Image (cartoon, rainbow, N blue to C red):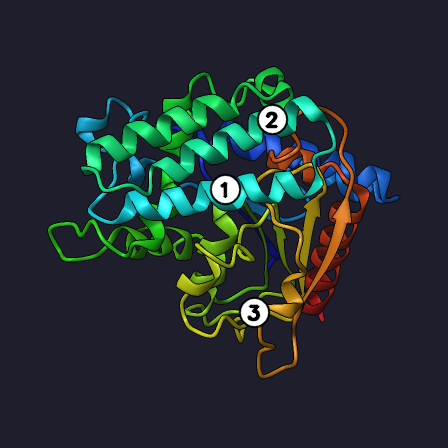
């Protein structure tokens, strides 16, 4: 039985799973060739090296009243969590930004964010947070990247993090939104064969929690652009607490880019406990080209990311054949 490779995506709008799968595969094949694995990279792109799946759950965030998910859908109290998330993002950028103009924009956004701490209704808070996002989109890098067309769209996508961590929005069977998302991802994991998991952005949080309920073997977990280390919003809300490496994971590699506005700088191994096998995440920095580096494909095209993935799949195949 061939090993499996499962991609877990992050925040964003509706997407075509097959198109996304092919795009992630193509980027991973590029990184594989850079790492000296040309033949495996080509085989991977043609689905001849492992069984590949794209674990899509984005449709679960779409609410009928939200016009396709572009308006932030927030329950009581979640607006404040989104405010804290934006504060983390702004403060992280202020720590590293050296351009005077960009620093002025960031400080202005921080001032707007401070104003949201005043007593107000939930609807007013959401409007103010959208205004903060609109200010952030004035940053040259954000504007040229074209990742978000409006502050409303940016706030709506970032709100997916707070909605997942709120453990709310139950369906008719009482399953909360985060449970349904984890169940969707677990449905792509086969307990009978080794599976390499690559998780991006919010997907790294989803994968971390889901894998605690997985009984199969994960020879390698790769997280890219992960917000797990956001101490105010994400880290204290992870489950279980304290955060630990899932028992099924043999090796965990975490990658962040210095220009990634979503991934904070601390090393994951300082904030996550080892599993019973002693596995801790190992973090490393990558440097991607271009304006917007948070996309999964930017990370996957890196030799330092793709190389270990190819090697793990190859070793898993050899184990299965032995």
Q: Label 1 vs label 3: CA separation? A: 21 Å
Q: Is tag 2's residue or tag 1's residue first in the polypeptide sequence?
A: 1
The residue positioned farthest toward the bottom in the image shown: 276
Residue 110 rendering spot, x and y as whole percentages: 49, 36
Q: Establish if 141 lies above or below 222.
A: above
Mark 3 residue element: loop
Which residue is disc 3 drawn over? 217
The answer to whether 35 is drawn above or below residue 64 in the figure is below
Percent x, y for residue 80? Answer: 32, 46
Which of pointers 3 and 2 indicates the residue nearer the eye? Answer: 2
For the residue labelled by badge 1, is the local secondary structure a helix, a strand or a loop? loop
Q: Is residue 316 left or right of residue 90?
A: right
The residue to which callout 2 is attached is 104
Q: Position of residue 232 (x, y in %)?
A: 46, 56
Q: Is mark 3 in CB contact (under 8 Å) with mark 2?
A: no
Residue 54 seen in the current view: no
Q: Would residue 304 appear left or right of 15 to someone viewing this image?
A: right
Instruction: Characterize the local packing of mark 1: few (<14), some (14-19) or many (20 or more) Cα atoms within 10 angstroms.
Output: many
Report how far apart the C-alphas of labels 3 and 2 lie in the structure.
Answer: 49 Å
Q: Residue at x 58, y 76 (%)?
A: 273
- Residue placed under numbered mark 1 in the picture: 9
In front: 54, or 204?
204
What separation in Å lies between label 2 and label 1 (alpha carbons)? 33 Å
Between disc 1 and disc 3, whose residue precedes?
1
């Amino acid at each position: 039985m061939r090993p499996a490779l499962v991609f877990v995506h992050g925040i964003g709008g509706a997407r075509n799973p097959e198109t996304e799968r092919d795009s992630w595969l193509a980027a991973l094949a590029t990184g594989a060739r850079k790492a000296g694995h040309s033949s495996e990279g080509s085989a991977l792109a043609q689905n001849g090296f492992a069984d590949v799946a794209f674990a899509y759950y984005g449709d679960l965030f779409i609410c009928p009243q939200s016009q396709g998910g572009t308006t932030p859908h927030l329950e009581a109290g979640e607006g404040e969590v989104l405010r804290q998330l934006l504060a983390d993002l702004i403060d992280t950028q202020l720590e590293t930004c050296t351009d005077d103009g960009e620093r002025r924009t960031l400080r202005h956004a921080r001032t707007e964010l401070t104003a949201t701490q005043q007593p107000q209704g939930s609807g007013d808070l959401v409007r103010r947070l959208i205004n903060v996002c609109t200010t952030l989109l004035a940053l040259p890098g954000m504007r040229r990247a074209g990742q978000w067309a409006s502050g409303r769209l940016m706030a709506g996508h970032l709100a997916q993090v707070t909605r997942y961590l709120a453990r709310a929005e139950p369906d008719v069977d009482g399953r909360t939104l985060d449970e349904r998302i984890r169940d969707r991802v677990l449905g792509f994991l086969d307990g009978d064969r080794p599976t390499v998991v690559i998780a991006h952005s919010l997907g790294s949080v989803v994968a971390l929690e889901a894998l605690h309920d997985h009984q199969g073997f994960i020879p390698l977990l790769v997280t890219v652009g992960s917000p797990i280390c956001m101490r105010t919003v994400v880290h204290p809300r992870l489950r279980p607490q304290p955060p630990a490496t899932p028992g099924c994971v043999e090796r965990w590699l975490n990658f962040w880019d210095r220009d990634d506005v979503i991934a904070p700088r601390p090393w994951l191994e300082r904030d996550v406990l080892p599993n019973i096998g002693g596995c801790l995440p190992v973090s490393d920095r990558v440097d991607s080209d271009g304006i917007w580096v948070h996309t999964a494909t930017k990370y996957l095209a890196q030799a330092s990311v793709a190389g270990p993935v190819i090697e793990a799949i190859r070793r898993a195949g050899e184990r299965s054949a032995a």
